[in-house]
Amino acid sequence: MTKHHIYTMSFASVYPHYVNKAEKKGRTKTEVDEIICWLTGYSQEEIEVELEKQTDFETFIGKAPQLNPARDMIKGVVCGVRVEDIEEPTMKEIRYLDKLIDELSKGKAMEKILRK
């Protein structure tokens, strides 16, 4: 089975889309970064390094320092698929991030996005 093309895309090529989506709705790059840090355990500095290295999405997720245990509380539909039903682990993590960015762009409060 061939890998989904998102796995081989650099995280740096997708990241600006996350930021643009948030900023179009009055949210900030700082909030996007906070979400990424919360989900993956990367520090802000580590995110910057991975962006600079053009790390592919599969590696970015695979070597995340500490995937947040509360991420299993993320529910809902993104890209027409219910995230809690995704079985492939890497795709599930990518879709978790997509879902959190969707919630941010829809105006949800950060406390709720970060499942506090």
Image: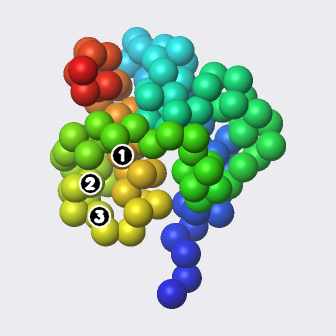
Question: Residue 106's x, y, as percent?
Answer: 27, 25
| Residues tagged 2 and 3 counted as in contact (Cβ below 8 A) | yes
Q: Residue furthest bottom?
A: 1
* Mark 1 vs mark 3, CA separation in Å: 10 Å
Give the amino acid at mark 1. Answer: Tyr
| Residues tagged 1 and 2 counted as in contact (Cβ below 8 A) | yes
Q: Earlier in the sequence, mark 1 or mark 2?
A: 2
The C terminus lies in quadrant: top left
Q: Is disc 2 surrounded by few (<14), some (14 to 19) or many (20+) residues within 10 Å?
A: many
The residue under the point 35% across, 34% down is 100
Q: Residue furthest right?
A: 53
Q: Secondary structure at mark 2?
A: helix
* Mark 1 vs mark 2, CA separation in Å: 7 Å
Q: Secondary structure at mark 1?
A: helix
The residue carrying mark 3 is 86
In this orientation, does residue 87 appear?
yes
The residue under the point 27% across, 16% down is 111
The residue carrying mark 2 is 83
Q: Is disc 3 surrounded by few (<14), some (14 to 19) or many (20+) residues within 10 Å?
A: few
Q: Is disc 1 surrounded by few (<14), some (14 to 19) or many (20+) residues within 10 Å?
A: many
25 versus 94 height, above or below: above
Q: Count the marks.
A: 3
The residue carrying mark 1 is 96
